[in-house]
Image (cartoon, rainbow, N blue to C red):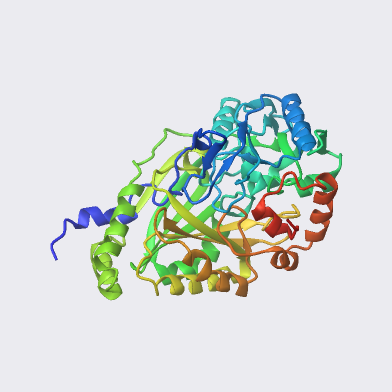
Amino acid sequence: MKTTLDRRALLRLGGGALLGAWAVRSAGPRAAAPAGGYRWRNWSGLQGCTAQALATPGDEAELARLLRAAGAAGTPLRCVGAGHSFTPLVPTAGKLVSLDRMSGLLAQDAAAGTATLLAGTRIAQLARQLDQHGLALRNQPDIDAQSYAGAISTATHGTGARLQALHADALALRLVTPAGEIVDCGGGRDDDLLQAARVSLGSLGVIARATIAVVPAYYLKRKLWLMPAQQMLDAAPELARTHRNFEFYYLPFTGYAAAIVHDLAPAGPASRPESQDEDMLRELRRLRDWLGKMPSLRRWVAQKLIDPGMSEQALDKSWRLLSTSRPTRFNETECHVPREAGIACAREVIARLERRDDVFFPMEFRFVQGDDAWLSPFYRRDSCSIAVHAAAGEACDYLVTDLAPIFRKYQGRPHWGKLHAHRAADFAALYPRWNDFLKLRRELDPRGLLLNPHLRGVFGVAT
């Protein structure tokens, strides 16, 4: 079989800022305007709906009027941000609400280490605006296209054994309830509501603004290298302990994994090699397409062409290194298991993936510190996060059917925005404050105006 694959091409498996998060910045909900409705689809194309309309309030007063009018008419509402969730959190037959016009940094206090922002602010925009004031987010997710409200509402996170998810830095939130009332929580005002609203799936009200903890702007030094996969699994806990940010990606059917660490560094001239992520993905896909039915040969070819001594370094401001963007679209499942079970769970996931011929996307493994938000997957539990992807347009059912039994075995809590098969009974067993959250949700939204079919299943609410 003659191919154009060569050693230089496959070396890209380890090149560049390897394996960011395969994402592009979204300009918001993608839609057409058919007669009688607003057509929406998520970033990967997996989820969609035709809603009655898309509302784009410009301030809190307009948002409150919108909610009151929807309540009077009995019209369901769902908020939409960048559309980077793969679960059907958004689809509704009612109205969609975008906060894109409610965006931007409102205030910052370097001495107090706080900043206040409108909830529709995209993480990428927030990071850049904070940087202009010499400030930064403590940590960032590997995709920064999301709106801030959407990101915290689904417990979006980065990596770091001593770093919490994004929502843990939300010190105060302003909600507009389904009744159209403006309610503040946090900062000594209704702290229970804050712990519920930090991760709420958009079911308690619409977040209008947030006050968050920030830190002085900082530089990071990144190092990337390859290791045999089994050695990486053995070394991962110590690497997480000794580096500020650590994660690894398992490269299917190669026998290798890529480690990425970030550590604090003095400011200096930026040095970032050009990303080769897309080239790497293409080569992994070609190996799958050419040799997928011959896994042993596929692995042998990859190991002959990969340079195991490859390493790479970069230096830049935190927001330029922690988040990445890529055009390749995908669907994803992710589960968070107790940290002590993380490596054992990853071994089983890898073994299961390699029983399939069609897998080529790398598996991502991260560390996250626990927090106290009621519906946080990290609620009072230091965790390891395991994420598995499938290219958009290809079969992705196996992300749930094949992997869910493994995640359940290790008491995994699924990422709220990633594909999963859990329902109310599962969550009640996994979340100690589950019933408290349900009670609060009923009090704030007794008619279920902020629910859709997916959330009714999640919360066990009758249609």
The x and y percentages for residue 137 are 61, 39
Q: Is residue 160 above or below residue 322?
A: below
Question: Is residue 266 visible in the rendered structure shown here?
Answer: no
If the image is split into quadrants, where does the N terminus sit? Answer: bottom left
Q: Residue at x 83, y 56 (%)?
A: 436
Q: Quadrant of residue 225?
A: bottom left
Front-most of 122 and 398?
398
82 horizontally vs 454: left or right: left
Front-most of 120 and 87?
87
Q: Quadrant of residue 5?
A: bottom left
The x and y percentages for residue 449 are 74, 44
Front-most of 318 and 86?
86
The x and y percentages for residue 274 are 34, 41
298 horizontally vs 53: left or right: left
In this view, the residue farthest toward the left is 2
In this view, the residue farthest toward the front is 35
268 horizontally vs 436: left or right: left
The x and y percentages for residue 328 are 39, 47
Total numbered labels placed on residues in the image? 0
If the image is split into quadrants, where does the C terminus sit? Answer: bottom right
Question: Is residue 371 visible in the rendered structure shown here?
Answer: yes
